């Protein structure tokens, strides 16, 4: 998923959301086992912050259940998703 976030010609908000969801399933001791090049880490981190709320709403929220749409349908929640994902990427980078 990091490679997808870093490597697509057009950044896809679903890649950000998938990494965010997967983050809760990663055992902290397993983070050091994730091997990704520094270039992919850098580009993935940059691409997190080019995703707008409108893109996220149209390509992710639209496909979620009604309950999940209520949870994720604010710019503040997207900001939290971005920060959480960026923090995970920073941990992988170390």
Image (cartoon, rainbow, N blue to C red):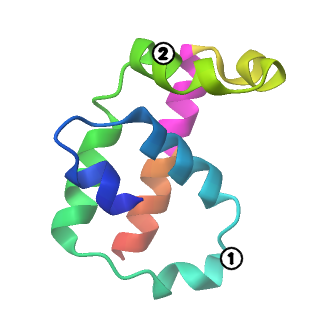
Residue 27's label in the rendered image is: 1
Drawn side of residue 68 relative to residue 35, left or right: right
| In the image, residue 76 lies in the stretch drawn in magenta | yes
Q: CA distance from mark 1 to mark 2?
A: 31 Å
Q: Which residue is mark 2?
A: 58
- Mark 1 lies on a secondary structure that is loop
**Residue 80 in the figure: left or right of residue 86:** right
Task: Give, as a single range, the part of the protein colored magenta.
Answer: 75-83
Q: Which mark is residue 61?
A: none
In the picture, residue 34 is in which quadrant?
Answer: bottom left
Neighbour tally class for label 1: few under 14, some 14-19, many 20 plus, Cα within 10 Å: few
Q: Residue at x 43, y 45 (%)?
A: 15
Which residue is drawn at the image coordinates 48% and 87% (left, top)? 33
Residue 85: where, in percent of width, then height? 49, 49
Label located before the other in sequence (1 or 2)? 1
Q: Nearer the viewer, residue 27 or 2?
A: 2
* Closest to the observer, 24 or 87: 24
Which secondary structure lies at badge 2? helix
Relative vertical location of residue 21 with respect to residue 74 in this rendering, above or below:
below
Image quarter where the C terminus lies is bottom left
Q: Is residue 17 above or below residue 55?
A: below
Residue 67 percent across, percent down from the top left: 83, 22
Residue at 24% x, 44% y is 46
| Quadrant of image for the N terminus | bottom left
Judged left or right of residue 12, residue 87 is right
Q: Residues within 10 Å of mark 2 (few under 14, many from 20)?
A: few
Q: Main secondary structure of the magenta part?
A: helix
Look at the picture and state if 25 lies above or below 6.
Answer: below
Q: Quadrant of residue 50?
A: top left
CB within 8 Å, label 1 to label 2: no
Q: Residue at x 70, y 65 (%)?
A: 25
Q: From the image, state whether disc 1 or disc 2 is nearer to you.
A: 2
């Amino acid at each position: 998923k990091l490679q997808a976030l870093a490597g697509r010609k057009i950044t896809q908000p679903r890649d950000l959301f998938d990494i965010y969801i997967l983050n809760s399933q990663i055992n902290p001791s397993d983070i050091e086992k994730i091997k990704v090049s520094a270039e992919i880490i850098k580009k993935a981190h940059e691409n997190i912050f080019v995703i707008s709320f409108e893109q996220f709403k149209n390509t992710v929220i639209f496909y979620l259940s009604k309950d999940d749409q209520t949870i994720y349908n604010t710019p503040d929640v997207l900001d939290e998703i971005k920060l959480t994902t960026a923090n995970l990427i920073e941990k992988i980078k170390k």
